Image: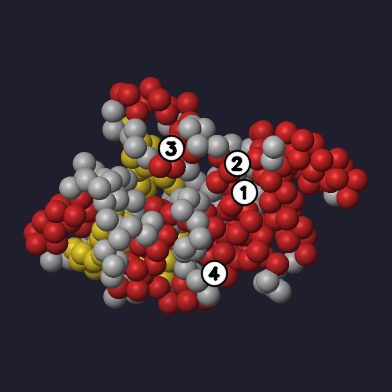
Amino acid sequence: MKISVIIPVYNAEKFLTQAVESALQFSEVYEVILIEDKSPDNALEICRKLAVIHDRVKLFQHPDKENHGAGPSRNLGIEKATGDFIAFLDADDYYLPNRFDAEKELFKKLNVDGVYGALGVHYYSEKAKADYYKVFGNRLTTIYKKHKPEDVFPGQLGMKGSFGLIHLDTLTIRKNALYKLDTFFKKTLRLHQDTEFLFRLSFFTNLYPGILNEPIAMRGVHENNRITKVDTRKINPATTRVMLWREVNDWAEGEAAIPDDVKIHIKRMTRSFEIAIAPFFKKWFMILKYLVTDYPSIRSGLYNINFRRDLM
């Protein structure tokens, strides 16, 4: 295996060296690609030092050297990658020694496009733990049990009950399988672009479970995580998620191969989040409208927003 590990770098100078070294511990890692995204801290200098010290570390920036976000940075990394397999890692997270144990066996089968595993949680400070333990606890981010590849797409969408989620840090994908997608990460989403990508990827490719009962990588939780601010409601999660589901809905409407019941579910999820962020009077107008025209949108939407902790 020749694995290219892609790390978007933004505002993570304290954690970057650990992330890179956690990837370099594996002989299967052919290269670590750093995409420096005009970070406001000293991350660029750290990237340069790591590229000098380690032959397998390669540093790139966007052509205009401006900030483009995690999605376009990962796209640039895929473009620059020369390995046969792609893995992703956030700059404030890190891999564990068992990261590619399952992959080494599963990828011997040609029908396996990708493999996913479980993500653990590491709190970088007592303050981070005090602030965010109620959000993440010590739970694994994972799909809760082994499923067939054809079940992963509807499961990720929330159509199979309490299913769980794939985290990008735990995904390894054949590079040539990525070209089954028209677009990699969407530039239109600044948050949840990884979730949207994983939805489409699970539709077009065969994703298999690796290690699900213990972590193969760790999520680093600190005070400056952008996604943490969403999860703790410092940013209204419904606002960011309605953007996600609108993007998914637009894609699904144009994809003839998606079954009608799946399209209806996606539309109802979109409506449910649109109701959540609507102003008071518009909210009630929408509720009354869908009570008449599409009652399941209200019923499933209220359930998903209020009770489903694992739904992005």
Amino acid type, label 2 = Ala
Instruction: Decide which of 55, 252 is in the foreground and name it.
Output: 252
- Reading the image, the residue beneath label 4 is 205
Marks 1/3: CA–CA distance: 17 Å
Query: Mark 4 or mark 1: which is in front?
Result: 1
Graded by Cα atoms within 10 Å as few (under 14), some (14 to 19) or many (20 or more), the crowding at tag 3 reads some
Q: Is residue 71 visible?
A: yes
Query: Residue 228 shows which numbered tag?
Result: 3
Pick the residue in front: 296 or 123: 296
Camera-near label (4 vs 3) is: 3
Q: Which sits earlier in the primary sequence, circle 1 or circle 3?
A: 3
Task: Please name which of the two marks, 2 or 4, marks the residue nearer to the observer.
Answer: 2
**Which residue corresponds to mark 1?**
242
Asked if the residue under mark 2 is in contact with the one under mark 1, i.e. CB atoms within 8 Å, the reply is: yes
The kind of residue tagged 3 is Thr
| Tag count | 4
> Which of pointers 4 and 3 lies earlier in the amino acid sequence?
4
Residue 246 occupies quadrant: bottom right
For residue 48, side relative to residue 198 (left or right): left
In this view of the protein, which residue sits in the foreground, 158 or 278? 278
